[in-house]
Image (spheres, coloured by chain):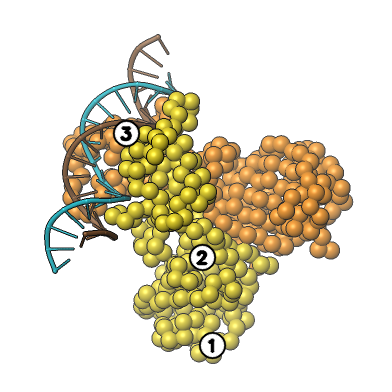
Chain colours: A yellow, B orange, C cyan, D brown
Amino acid sequence: MVAKVVERQMGVALWRQIADRIRLAISNGDYDATGMVPPETALAAEFGVNRHTVRSALAALAEEGLVRAVQGRGTMIERKDRVSYPISRRTRFSQGLGRQVREIGTELLGHAQVPASGEIATALGVPPGTPLIELSTVSSGDGRPLSTAVSYYPAERFARMAEEYAQLGSVTKAFAAHGLDDYVRVSTEIVARHAEAEELSLLKLSPGAIVMETQSVNADLEGRPVEYSRTRFAADRMKLRIET
Amino acid sequence: MVAKVVERQMGVALWRQIADRIRLAISNGDYDATGMVPPETALAAEFGVNRHTVRSALAALAEEGLVRAVQGRGTMIERKDRVSYPISRRTRFSQGLGRQVREIGTELLGHAQVPASGEIATALGVPPGTPLIELSTVSSGDGRPLSTAVSYYPAERFARMAEEYAQLGSVTKAFAAHGLDDYVRVSTEIVARHAEAEELSLLKLSPGAIVMETQSVNADLEGRPVEYSRTRFAADRMKLRIET
DNA sequence: GGAAATTTGTCCGTATGTATC
DNA sequence: TGATACATACGGACAAATTTC
């Protein structure tokens, strides 16, 4: 291949120009055959720059969520379409995703009984120290991790939450098994930040990836809180839709 | 100062260990006197590593929004408390921020009359090509940029939108000046992503910073859309609260 | 299963450019 | 203007993970 050396000087950093070129090549479908970006050394040769400069460019693209580098294998191109997750008074995880994904996977990572502490006690309207069931879960669509959550339920009222969820794979059904047929979302708070190490691993994200974290409270129809949940969505795979 | 060389080997990259150390020092208040992190060369000497290694650590902290580097000046520590922005059927920018900030600033960056195109026409329920008033704004709290928005209004119904907004500094008041006394939020969609160059500049963010982008439609009480808006919030300064 | 090749990850040293004070 | 401090780029070396043979 003819060496296409990028222009030097002129205010725009080399690595930015290279990132733009690679981004263009990806959107042109130049790498569709393999779904991978050429190796760093090949790109460095093609653009006539040092490998480190290519790495800066690829790092920027990885932060955008456009590519994902794996040591020893290469740098893969990521699909970027986002699944829409509706948040309403009646937010139900599985129903919400509906026809956007063929198969919804829910995995129970672990569970425990813990005393309610501070913020969570306030959110659930119980005294600090009240026993709670804690569930850690990961949900995915068509095999792609979409969100991970830690949820808390009053242990007295929902004693078998972990077992029911593990068996039924649905919070709504686990509630029903405890005699709670309906519940509504009473509050949701959303922040966006960089994913932490654990989230990177659970959601299979690249370092620098973004998560949207929601903290939500669900209550029964009498207004008694039944669930406090902290959910982290992979920001490059999900968008939130608020329905009023 | 005694040289505190970080441990080599052992799986965790040097720059990560150093990032952790600096993060800890910041939260300990070690740098409160100046509000700045020591220069890169000083940190490199302190930790007994190359300056590039310190740069990797600082870059990671900058992405977290914890620090902000300015060429020629130094690396400043950023405050991280987030202003809560409520989204409800009656979302009003100024009222929502309420007592969280002392002073709310709204700046009209520019305005234009443009034909409705595709997505926006659909959202506003008008034929493509319908003339719209486009407003570009930046809002800040206590002098800190919080969000920037591009909003569209049917030009026929809200002909003096730009002038009224420029004078009144409020969409709600500008609507009132056109005889519209009440309106409600009908849809909101939220994504999180890295800020683009223009957003970095408008919101005074560091490269790699995160924005939450909302696309929303407001309608009058008869259900006719009156506003389509694309708002980008500085993610490290804002959280969204959904009120149902 | 194991060795070699490939590919990304980390770190060092150096040099130069550019913005701020 | 000069000094300081961050930004960019190069070159080299080795480590770690994966794939290939």
Which residue shows up at 35% across the image and 39% down it? A44
| Percent x, y of residue B130 | 82, 49
Badge 3: few (under 14), some or many (20 or more) residues near its Cα, within 10 Å?
some
Q: Is residue B4 visible?
A: yes
Q: Toward the viewer: A62 or A3?
A: A3
Q: Secondary structure beneath disc 1?
A: helix
- The residue indicated by pointer 2 is A215
Element carrying mark 2: strand
Q: How many marks?
A: 3
Residue A156 pos. (x, y %): 44, 85
Query: Tag 3: residue type?
Result: Glu
Circle 3 residue: B40
Residue A207 shows up from this direction: no
For marks 3 and 2, give the one nearer the viewer: 3
Do circles 2 and 1 both sit on a common chain?
yes
Q: Quadrant of residue B39?
A: top left
Q: Are marks 3 and 1 on the same chain?
A: no
Q: CA distance from mark 3 to mark 2?
A: 37 Å
Q: Quarter of the image for the C terminus of chain B: give it.
A: bottom right
Q: Depth check: give the residue in front, A114 or B43.
A: B43
The amino acid on which the numbered mark 1 sits, given as a three-letter code, is: Ala
Residue under mark 3: which chain is it in?
B
Residue B102 is tagged as: none
Q: Does A208 sit above or below residue B51?
A: below
| Residues at marks 3 and 2 touching, judged by CB atoms closer than 8 Å | no
Q: Where is mark 1, residue-wise? A: A176
Give left or right: position of B122 versus B234: right
